[in-house]
Image (tube, rainbow, N blue to C red):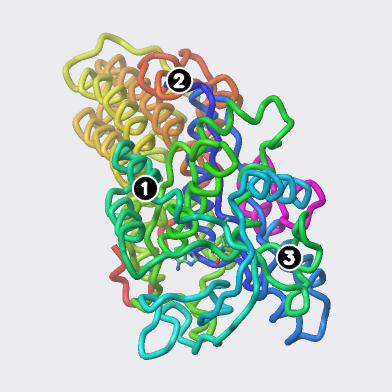
Amino acid sequence: MSDSFYITSPIYYVNAEPHIGHTYTTVVIDTLARYHRLAGEDTFFLTGTDEHGEKIAEVAADRGVPPRQVADEISGAFRSAWEQLGFSYDRFIRTTEDEHIRTVQAFLQKVYDAGEIYFTEYEGLYCVGCERFLTDRDLVDGLCADHERPPEARVESNYFFRMTAHFEWLADYIENHPDFIRPERYRNETLAMLREESGLGDLCISRPKNRLEWGIELPFDDKYVCYVWFDALINYLTGIGYPDDPGFEPRWAVAEHVIGKDILKPHGVYWPTMLRAAGLPPARHLNVHGHWNVDDRKVSKSLGNMISPLVMKEKYGFDAFRYFLLRDMVFGLDANFSEAALISRINADLANNLGNLASRTLNMTERFADGAVPSPGEAGEPELVVQRALPVAAERVDAHLRKFEFHRALEAVMELVDTVNRYLEIRAPWKAAKDPELADQVATALYTSCEALRAVALLMAPFLPETAPVILERLGLPDALSGTRLPDDAARFGALQPGTPTTKGAPLFPRIEVPDGDAD
Ligand code: MSP
């Protein structure tokens, strides 16, 4: 296992406010970054904004303001949203930063000097939404399939990157590293792109300044700016100090990219070939997720169904929304969001199960053990069932998270919660407490459930970063997360010291009542 972890988000275009799609990608990354930190790995989480290109220039022109103003505003909105949502990124990069501009120019010069770039005339159909020339495959009834708008015919002299020269190498690389692009369906999709005969040609990497000024100037021709995707992808290098920072190489060696399926081509084809031209290896993994639909429709500005994460936080708490996003999407496949589904998930898993376990455990510890973790007596078979469930859950969470199987990791924690709730039904301390002869059994039951709750809180910490510390604090462990090593500390039964003071506190996830009352 590596003790270093570098994870990147796509950098977000500054033409739309943060919505459910951006939020999902970032929640996935934040969860992994938190887990790997708790596993003791030296973790770096990079996110930011993608600010150049025609799309932004168009928005600015429509509003009659300079592109930089649009970029500053929307980049600021992302940054502020990411802060309010508590994402634990280490760096928020902007492609308009001087450092990034220098890195892109150094990269371009290196690739140019290596003979990987040539100048020629090109004629084709260009989609401003995609920021690229389209191929026949991208068109449906003459419209761009993604943006449903007609492309423009363009003839231009431009600089091209000899991308196709690396296709054979890339196809071999993908074949020989079967988990480089995962899940598998996206690996196959990328291989199909590389093999398709009519498909991809060399990559046009420049835009003449007389048509677009909003970009990074080419270091070898000041009449051109760099194509926005070529500029944007390099952020993954700038973010960790390429080329000069001595920390760059070891971090790059463990790079994990997380992207949505709509940006597979630039990440699966352009980026590995660009890196190779610059003498760098590909990232370790390209992790590709599906799309969220909302009420069974594609998310779009025109439908106004973008779902603001800040509104979700306000209404339901952000931990609950995170839980839903990770639990209801199988990473790699599409999923559907509806507020009714969110509410049923909150009620079933968080209020009835997790919240119930925490409140009954802490309430009974207050009532029957004077608000302090009691000393356990001897463990019987029901206790052993709980004790054995801890390492099973901890190992499953670790294994599933390392494979991006978030829904399964959460299932594993919730199965532990179920096991403890069933255990409490068996021992029924609320009944046993009435019989003084069963005092030892009550103490054992409360110790066992407090201890299992501690493990649940540790395992939930990456998923529910606001709630887990509250549970630990109520268990008298306010600093538990700072010294924790996952998965081991959640697997080991018996860490709680008898006598530790506990507090019961308010319900963690109050049940959400809906008018027709059918939300669970
Ligand atoms: N700027 C480029 C990325 C450059 S990375 C070098 C970009 N930006 S974006 O803002 O349009 O999208 C960012 C991410 O949000 C993408 O990974 C995209 O897949 C994701 N999502 C946008 N809408 C989405 C859904 N409806 N569902 C899930 N994720 C989707 O692309």
Name the amino acid, label 3.
Answer: Val
When the figure is inspected, residue 435 is found, relative to residue 164, above or below; the finding is above
- Queried whether the magenta region covers residue 341, the answer comes back as no
The residue mark sitting in front, 1 or 2, is: 1
- Between marks 1 and 3, how big is the CA–CA gap? 29 Å
From the viewer's perspective, is 327 left or right of 317? left
Whole-percent x and y of residue 89? 63, 43
Q: Where is mark 2, residue-wise?
A: 373
* 2 and 3 marks in contact (CB < 8 Å): no
Q: Which label belongs to residue 225?
A: 3
Name the amino acid, label 1.
Answer: Glu
Q: Secondary structure at mark 2?
A: loop
Q: Secondary structure at mark 1?
A: helix
Q: Earlier in the sequence, mark 2 or mark 3?
A: 3
Q: Residue furthest top?
A: 378
Q: Which label belongs to residue 168?
A: 1
Q: Which residues are magenta?
A: 80-100
- Between marks 2 and 3, how big is the CA–CA gap? 65 Å
When the figure is inspected, residue 24 is found, relative to residue 223, above or below; the finding is above
Residue at the spot 54% in from the left edge and 72% down from the top edge? 132
Residue at the spot 45% in from the left edge and 64% down from the top edge? 201
